Amino acid sequence: MIVTTGNDVAGAEIVAYLGIVRGIVVRSTGLARGLVGGLRSIGGGNIPEYVAVCEEAREHAYELMVEHAREVGAEAVIAFRYDATEFSQGSTEVLAYGTAVKIRQT
C-alpha cells in the first residue's frame, strides 16, 4: 500500500477517489510506564517511556488505517496525517487518516 502525505502519487495517475480512511487508537501510559515517566518528567527533557507509548499508538493507528484502505479497495492513501487529542487525563486518542484512491501507473 502506497501511503503519502502528498496529494498525488509520483509516477501514477489517480483514477478514483474512494473517500476518507482512518485508524483510531486510544492509549494510556499504563502503570509502570506512567510511574517511571512521571518521575523522569520532574527532571525535564525527553521521556523515553512516553515516546514508546506514542510510537506504539501511531503505528497501531497507521496499521488500522491501511487495513481500512484495503477494505474499501484502495491502492494508495494520499494526504496522510496524524492527529492526537487527550481523551481523558492519562489517555490519548491517536488518529491516522487520509484519502483512499485507486491509481494507474503512468
Image (cartoon, rainbow, N blue to C red):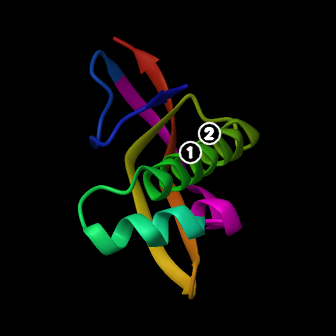
- Looking at the image, residue 17 sits to the left or right of residue 23; the answer is left
Q: Position of residue 64 (x, y in %)?
A: 67, 47
Circles 1 and 2: CB atoms closer than 8 Å: yes
User: Residue under circle 1?
Assistant: 62
Q: Which mark is residue 87?
A: none
Q: Residues within 10 Å of mark 1 (few under 14, many from 20)?
A: many
Q: Residue furthest right?
A: 71
Residue found farthest to the top: 106
The dominant secondary structure in magenta is strand
Is 30 included in the stretch rendered in magenta?
yes
SS at badge 1:
helix
Q: Nearer the viewer, residue 12 or 94?
A: 94
On screen, 44 above or below 69? below
Magenta residues, start to end: 13-33
Q: Nearer the viewer, residue 67 or 74?
A: 67
* Relative image position of residue 97 (x, y in whole percent): 50, 56
Q: Which residue is mark 2?
A: 66
Q: Amino acid at mark 2?
A: Val
Looking at the rendered structure, the secondary structure element under dot 2 is helix
Front-lying residue, 10 or 29: 29
Q: Is residue 85 left or right of residue 23?
A: left
Amino acid carrying mark 1 in the image: Tyr
Q: What's the distance in space between the residues labelled 1 and 2, CA to CA? A: 6 Å
Residue drawn 51% across and 48% down? 52
Badge 2 crowding class, 10 Å Cα cut-off, few under 14, some 14 to 19, many 20 or more, is many
Please name the residue shown 35% across and 25% down the image. 13
Against 30, is 22 above or below? above
